[in-house]
Amino acid sequence: MSAHVFFVPSINLMGKGCLHEAGPYIKELNLNKALVVTDKFLMKSGIAGKVTSMLDDIGLNYAVYDEVKPNPTCKNVHDGVQFLQENGCDFLISIGGGSPQDTAKGIGIIATNGGHITEYEGVHKSKHKSLPIVAINTTAGTSAEITINYVITDEERKVKMVMVDKNSVATISVNDPELMVDKPAALTAATGLDALTHAIEALVTPGSYPVTDATALAAVEIIFNHLARAVSNGHDIEAREQMVYAIFLGGLAFNNAGLGYVHAMAHQLGGVYDLPHGVCNAMLLPIVEEENAKHVPEKFRAIAKVIGFEDKGKTDKECADYVIQRIKDLSKEVGIPSKLSELGVNEVDLDLLAENSMKDACAPGNPFIPTKEQVIEMFKKIL
């Protein structure tokens, strides 16, 4: 039996009101000044202000960098590094979903390793640990606050670069559902299905093992039971809190087992068209898993059972068909678009999208490796 390494932040706070418990843990880091990494929306909406008020209460010095884009770029990272240095900051506090979290990771890695962010594309490219990061999450989706992965868009190549780097993992993660109650329904749906994608890809990848299977299956069950509630009523704090647990569990799974072609393909749609990552994953998930089920149908039996399918006497294929149909039904229920053409995707770009998908760092984690023609065909199914 091969050995496994399990990466996770040292301290993880989760549950209603946990933001108010974070202050003492931050002070225990004995650092001087934080660079708060966030975006304009979170500043204007007052969500970031809930965090900075807590920082004021504990007497922490900080400077705010709020230029992060929805699909963060190389410029975001390097502008952030310059801002960090100009303000004499020695650690980072990221506030937001995947975009601020990923940007903070990039800033932290460049601050301690130097060079250009493009040099770190791939797996474990840095030599030195990032500056300490306190990752305060505001969306139930990406799990970026607890993972060793981050994604930065290279504006010149129009490519989303995937970095898998143990040196980028946060020191403290904070998942407080009270920071998520005012998120729009569409964002809640997209990020929730992003979380479902993480869990399912972590289950079907050859890199899975019993520990990651357990956390991924728990995440799948919670998401099917609570995502639609969170979408229909954002102030349903129980549903929001359950989604917090789901993203933590799913994050633990894919952080240590890996992902696959749903993410490999979604990254390219984001890089070329600047589309929301969660929406792309949601649209691609049933398409890619239909193909995966032809190669590892047995992987879908456990998924089917936790979402209510009586599998006794059923074939692996029947279990897989049930799972894929339930994914489609959930996506429709929470309002995910059905066609990429609705989002501006053009057939002329499919060759480029497929070619770049095959180069993506997530691609090797898929249960089978498709040809370029097969990747194009998967895109076409939802074009």
Image (tube, rainbow, N blue to C red):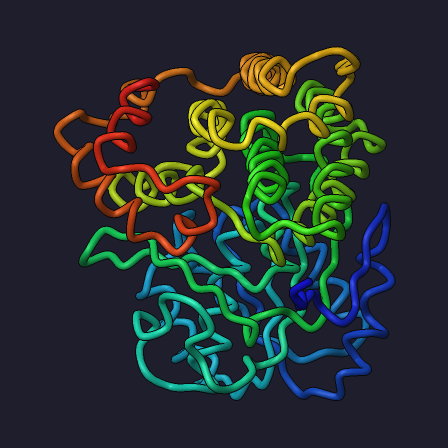
Q: Residue at x 54, y 68 (%)?
A: 64
Looking at the picture, tell me which residue is in the foreground, 358 or 144: 358
Residue 7 seen in the current view: no
Examine the image and state in which quarter residue 18 appears. bottom right
Q: Is residue 149 above or below residue 294?
A: below
Q: Is residue 17 left or right of residue 181?
A: right
In this picture, is 373 found above or below 324? below
Q: Residue at x 35, y 17 (%)?
A: 339
Q: Position of residue 78 (x, y in %)?
A: 35, 73
Residue that lies at the very extreme toward the left in this rendered image: 348
Residue 158 x, y percent position in the rendering: 23, 51
The total of numbered circles placed on residues is: 0
Left or right, 343 with respect to 201, comes to left
Q: Nearer the viewer, residue 29 or 40?
A: 29
Q: Is residue 229 above or below residue 152?
A: above
Is residue 106 in sight in this rendering? yes
Q: Position of residue 86 (x, y in %)?
A: 44, 85
